[in-house]
Amino acid sequence: MVKQKIVLKLALDDERKRRKAFKAAVGMSGVTSAAMEGEKIIIVGDSVDPITLTTVLRRSLGYAELLSVSSGDDKKKDGYGAAYGYGAGEKKKDG
C-alpha cells in the first residue's frame, strides 16, 4: 500500500466545525491518522482518494482547498544532514 500525506485548508470558524471536519476525515476508509494545525488538516493514510476527501469536506463545511498530496514518509531524500543521522544517503566518515 502507498502511504499518503494530504494537507487541506478549511474554513474553521468555531469548535463545532473543527469537530465536524475531523470526524468526516477520520471516517474515510484508509485514513490512519489526522491532525489539525490552525486552519489546516493533515491526513495520513493508505490509498486515500484526495478528491473524494476534499468533496466530502466541502459538502459538510462549505469550503475545503486541497493544498498538497505527497508520500507519507517525512525523511529527506537528498541526504541533507546524513552525517548526523538525518535523511537518506550514507554517513560521512572521519579520517
Image (cartoon, rainbow, N blue to C red):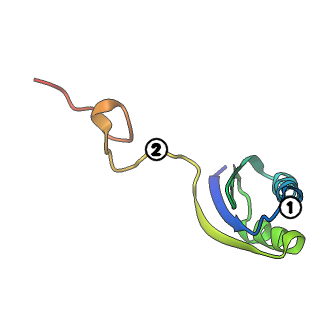
Question: Which type of secondary structure does the marked residue at label 2 adopt?
Answer: loop
Question: Which type of secondary structure does the marked residue at label 1 adopt?
Answer: helix
**What percent of the width, then of the height, locates residue 74?**
51, 46
Q: Nearer the viewer, residue 9 or 78?
A: 9
Question: Which residue type carries mark 1?
Answer: Lys
Structural distance between the alpha carbons of marks 1 and 2? 32 Å
Q: Residue at x 80, y 65 (%)?
A: 13
> Which labelled disc corresponds to residue 75?
2
**Which of the 4 image quadrants contains residue 49?**
bottom right
**What percent of the width, then of the height, locates residue 78?**
34, 50
> In this view, which residue lies farthest toward the left?
95
- Residue 19 visible in the picture: yes
- Residue identifier under label 1: 17
Q: Residue at x 64, y 61 (%)?
A: 7
Direction from residue 85 to residue 55 in the image, left or right? right
Which corner quadrant holds the C terminus?
top left
Up the image or down, 77 lies above or below 53; here it is: above
- Residue 90 visible in the picture: no
Question: Which residue type carries mark 2?
Answer: Lys
**What percent of the width, then of the height, locates residue 38?**
67, 56
Q: Earlier in the sequence, mark 1 or mark 2?
A: 1
